[in-house]
Amino acid sequence: MSAPNTDALVKEYRENGFAVVERLFDPSEVAELNTAITDILNVPDIGSVAEVEPGDNGMARRIWSPTKQHSAFERAAAHPKLLDHVEALIGPDILFHYSKLHLKAPQVGSVVDWHQDFAYYPHTNTDLVTALVYLDDTTTENSALQAVPGSHLRGLADHYVDGYFRGKVAGADAPDPALAVPIEAPAGSVVFIHCLLLHYSSPNRSDRYRRAFLPAYRAADAYPIHFGSHAGHNEPGVKLLRGNVSDTARVEAGTWRLPLAERPFGSLFQLQEGANQTETAATTGYATLEDAK
């Protein structure tokens, strides 16, 4: 491992639940990824490769599994510099978990409500990290990620609404917006997000894009404890990127509610918006890991 300043990175991540490395990807690499987005979307039916914004604008808001759709994103997710930083945060045995790509178009980009990634993907431990790679210069005006520093230390919040998993922390349980800090950074920068960090992003009200590539990783000894229609569909694509596989699950004590929605859902956006609620799920459930060591 050769990542510089990893001590400062780890300290920031442990204390705040996120850490920022500016310009980890150079301009030519960012340009390659933005060109890849254009290539992916250059199809007769955008809906075949991406989720489209509500309404009649026809703008894509999320590209599904970009690492499967273009080799540039597959290379970026395994970039040695990126993995050096991931290793500093979760250890030397690194599994690729999944990827997504959010496209917040000017004056269009959808809101992402308060949530914690772990609520969607509960595992035996919390050494899961998402690397949010800004592909545009990002400020509050074009929807920089916002987070509550230290919120990852408070455990898993309730992501249920009206008795079903809705993928957001709502109502009185939602954090005070005054506690949120915008994470602004230039294109090519990476925000490393702890799986229990409370975070959200506002609509894009600027005249600029805010594109973000999000490869997610987990320690090799972090095993999923739920295989529902959403949480389980990533498992066939999980692969070892560095180190060794583990035949042992490292288990943290705790009680974590399972993501049981009222219907199968296709994305965070659709789930939080509560669209097309036509199917019912099984009764709510819990996974309990008491006094685990």
Image (tube, grey):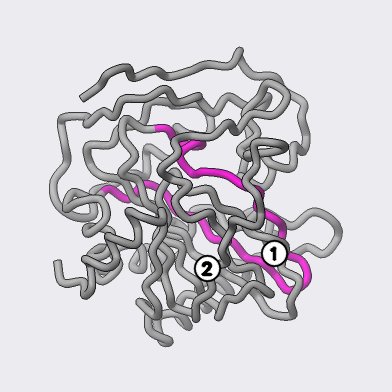
94 in relation to 107, above or below: above
- Which-is-in-front pick, marks 1 and 2? 2
Q: Secondary structure at mark 2?
A: strand
Position of residue 221 measured from the top left corner of the image (x, y, whole percent): 22, 37
Q: Amino acid at mark 2?
A: Ile
Query: Dot 2 corresponds to which residue?
Result: 183
Q: Which residue is mark 1?
A: 44
Q: Please state which of residues 11 and 233 is positioned toward the viewer in this rendering.
A: 11
Q: Quadrant of the C terminus?
A: top left
- Label 1: few (<14), some (14–19) or many (≥20) C-alpha neighbours in 10 Å: few
Report how many numbered discs are placed on residues in the image.
Answer: 2
Q: Secondary structure at mark 1?
A: loop
Real-space Cα separation, disc 1 to disc 2, in angstroms: 35 Å
In magenta, the rendered stretch is 95-122
From this viewpoint, which residue is outermost toward the bottom? Answer: 28
Residue 105 is a magenta residue: yes
Q: Residue at x 31, y 46 (%)?
A: 218
